[in-house]
Image (cartoon, coloured by chain):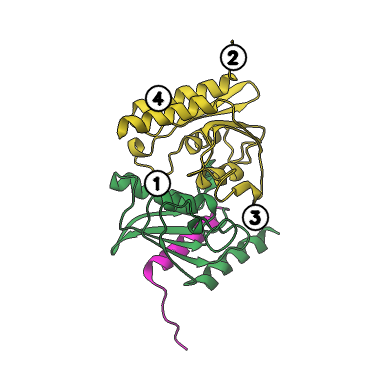
Chain colours: A yellow, B green
Amino acid sequence: MTRWPLPQPMQRALALAQQAAERGEVPVGAVIMRGNECIAEGYNSPREDHDPTAHAEIVAIREAARILGNDRLIDCELWVTLEPCAMCAGAIAHARIGKLYYAAADPKGGAVEHGTRVFEQAQCLHRPDVYSGMGASEAAELLKAFFRERR
Amino acid sequence: MTRWPLPQPMQRALALAQQAAERGEVPVGAVIMRGNECIAEGYNSPREDHDPTAHAEIVAIREAARILGNDRLIDCELWVTLEPCAMCAGAIAHARIGKLYYAAADPKGGAVEHGTRVFEQAQCLHRPDVYSGMGASEAAELLKAFFRERR
């Protein structure tokens, strides 16, 4: 059986997640696209950077906003290997990200289809279109392998 | 009538909020204390910094973690002039902030006693002690004056 290949941004996000794992960080990677252009990338790095906010999504959003010279990432898409947490979902809303693609769901820490469900709150000022599941098994396997090694 | 003075960290957070207003940013200020020592400060600066995550709390948390060389701000307190949003409440939990003091409640964007109530979720891995209300009228007046001028 030949499997349909993952879209390139998710392949790249998975490679970034692998980079995080190699640096001893929980493997999550993120990419910000505008059309066919990759604007910014990030991987999870709170320990290395001494920054509790340095989740892959936040790293990529901050970098994209810096590069575009605008705190609103209109027409941008965020591709990330794991369901965003409350912090990251809040940042995605503040940044006005148009589309969110995430691979694996995260019942323990996710805040899109779990927990606080940030985008479903009446309070939420901006809701991206959300697509999930592509690359889920690959993303989950990276996380499982990481935590297996650490036990 | 002589009014009981506000604790010094909240006075400082209010002064930082005023600085934000003078730079055309929504006036919110934050201070991180460890014991009697001020570790870091921040004011809301998403537009000036081209950074949608640059809320006062995030600016102060990132700076404190950088200075302490640790992504966990154990034994630290965060003083902020407005109820934190979902993004900031998530960051406070990730940073393991011990105590959170905020002045004005924010029914529109707050995520502590409103909206997603991040710390009340079963998912939340760390809950700070929360104290609110001190300086609420001063903080609200800064916000009202800011939006009045912009109308």
Q: Is residue A42 left or right of residue B34?
A: right
Q: Mark 3 belongs to which subunit?
A: A
* Dot 4 amino acid type: Gln
In contact (CB < 8 Å): disc 1 and disc 3: no
**Same chain, marks 3 and 2?**
yes
Q: Position of residue A5 (x, y in %)?
A: 59, 15
Label 4 crowd bin: few (<14), some (14–19), many (20+), radius 10 Å: some
Q: Nearer the viewer, mark 1 or mark 3?
A: 3
Vertical placement of A103 versus A87: above or below? above
Mark 1, residue position: B62
Report the residue at 55% width, 24% height from top: A10
Q: In the rendered structure, find residue A123 and report the number of the disc placed on it.
A: 3
Viewer can see residue A127: yes
Mark 4, residue position: A19
Q: CA distance from mark 2 to mark 1?
A: 42 Å
Q: Mark 1 belongs to which subunit?
A: B
Q: Position of residue B69 (x, y in %)?
A: 29, 44
**Same chain, marks 4 and 2?**
yes
For the record, the magenta segment spans: B1-24
Q: Position of residue A29 (x, y in %)?
A: 47, 29
In contact (CB < 8 Å): disc 2 and disc 1: no
The secondary structure type at the circle numbered 4 is helix
Principal secondary structure, stretch drawn in magenta: helix
Q: Quadrant of residue B79?
A: bottom left
Given residues B124 and A72, the one toward you in this image is B124
State yes or no: residue B5 in magenta: yes
Q: CA distance from mark 1 to mark 3?
A: 26 Å
* Dot 2 amino acid type: Arg
* Dot 1 amino acid type: Arg
Q: CA distance from mark 4 to mark 3?
A: 36 Å
Report the residue at 38% width, 39% height from top: A46
Mark 2, residue position: A3
